[in-house]
Image (tube, rainbow, N blue to C red):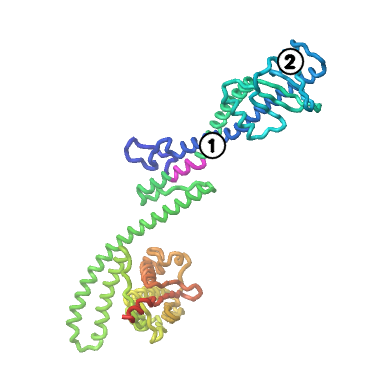
Amino acid sequence: MAEDTPVANDGAAPKRGQGTRRSWRAGLSGKLLVLTLLFVMVSEILIYVPSIANFRLSWLRDSHATASVAAMVLAEGSEVPKALQARLLSSTDTIAIALLAGDRRRLLAVDMPPESVDLHVDLAEMEPLSAIVDAFAVLLETEPHTIRVSGAAPGRDERVEIVISDRRMRTAMLAYSRNILMLSLLISVITAVLVYMSLRWLLVRPMQRLSAAIEDFADNPEDASRIIEPSDRADEIGDAERRLATMQRQLLETIHQRRRLADLGLAVSKINHDLRNLLAAAQLFSDRLSSSPDPTVQRVLPKIVGTLDRAVGYTRAVLSYGRTGEAPPSRRLIRLRQVVEDVADLVGLAQHPDIVFENRVPADLEVDADTDQLSRVLINLARNAVHILETDGDTALVRRVEVSAERAGGVVTIRVADTGPGIPPKVREHLFQPFQGSTRKGGTGLGLAISAEIVRAHGGSIALAETTPGATFEITLPDRPVDLAAIRRAVGK
């Protein structure tokens, strides 16, 4: 069967089971890998943006908390030596520390007073959006800036205010960003590989297998060994494989039927040629015997010639069925009872010694149909019924063929019923399909298939009645629709 991965053949025609090779970038696998990497990176960016803002706030809070402890120590004494102030400021990485009590600000320690403060941060009033904007401003700014950070002192009512430089914070933020970037890349690669392998196993390889199986079957659709063998998967891929296998089997069967129809057409064309010769000879005999005074000869001879003429027409119709289908019906109003009588004579029902024939069609019933085509439909059904009844050896069997009809408005329903054993259930499934719906042993099923096509061309339907003994076929033929607009235009003229 088809291989999972299509492989090129160095410019030559692909081997069996191989599809057309595509570039890695154009392939579904490559696209899945790139998209997975892209989506994971986008997810990491969405995570990084708030996390870097949170990292900056945490840095400011930690610096403020450390400086607040120093502020509490400095606030206990009246005067702190400069050397101690310098050590406290250095250990807390601050420029100045002040204690706020109401409106009073007490400067506890200062190294060198800054010329200006670039940003004021109140830890109690931080908003997420402004925190993100400020964090990226620190990352993108190369020049040093001073930040004044204020917040509540731990365990006291006063507030502690510190002034710091953003350089060490920026360095830490850049290191954090690099770590996040490296971790994101590692997670992206691992995730992409896992997702890629999973999707390739779940989707890509089965789809490649389906594609290769389709191409393989298209190379030679008459080779049954090229039909895909469905896997045991219970998901949509398994359903697709099973449906593809079913479609391939149906197509293979259709191709075989087409070939058989072509062979049948050749055989029928030969038969048609011989029948035309017989018809010509019969016409010569008819001309010679037309002057015979024997009444039997005068009655039988036209029927023989007519039968041969119909046989030639039937073989032509079979040839038409094998090519493009039936010719459009030439419809007109005909007396159905007379058509049924002619059909009974042609199939030998009227004088049959063992089969009772009943023509229950009302004498005044008219049907809008093509005479020859409707006769062919009735002949096919009557001949099948006669054959089934003749092959049944049960002497107690009531052998009867009955044709009835009725009109309801613009629709005529014709019933052809027999008292035979009925249609087997297996045959009913393909009753009107050529080579599959034969009702008798050795039949081709073309008769019912052609009959169904003729009835459909008349806008009607043919079906097998389900609740009757034996077999009863119901033919529904509607009258042609009347074009009222055309009639009004004709009357108006």
Where disc 2 sits, the SS reads helix
User: Which residue appears at 59% of the width and 29% of the height?
Assistant: 136
* Amino acid at circle 1: Phe
Question: The residue under label 2 is which amino acid type?
Answer: Leu
Q: Nearer the viewer, residue 101 or 35?
A: 101
Q: Residue 201's x, y, as percent? A: 51, 39
Pick the front one: 204 or 475: 204
Q: In this figure, which residue is indicated by the disc labeled 1?
A: 39
- Relative to 387, is 365 above or below? below
Q: Which residues are magenta?
A: 201-210
Locate residue 191 relative to residue 291 in the image: left or right.
right
Instruction: Determine whether, in the image, residue 154 is placed left or right of residue 286.
Output: right
Q: Main secondary structure of the magenta part?
A: helix
Judging by the rendered image, the residue that carries numbered circle 2 is: 88
Can residue 348 be seen in this snapshot? no
Question: Foreground: 470 or 257?
Answer: 257
The residue at 33%/81% (across/down) is: 492
Above or below: residue 396 compared with residue 427:
below
Q: Quick check: 181 above or below 292?
A: above
Mark 2 vs mark 1, foreground winner is: 2
**Circle 1 crowding by C-alpha within 10 Å: few under 14, some 14–19, many from 20:** few
Quarter of the image for residue 310 reads bottom left
Using a 10 Å C-alpha cutoff, classify the residue at mark 2 as few (fewer than 14 neighbours), some (14 to 19) or many (20 or more): many
Where disc 1 sits, the SS reads helix
x and y percent of residue 160 in the render?
A: 75, 24
Q: Earlier in the sequence, mark 2 or mark 1?
A: 1
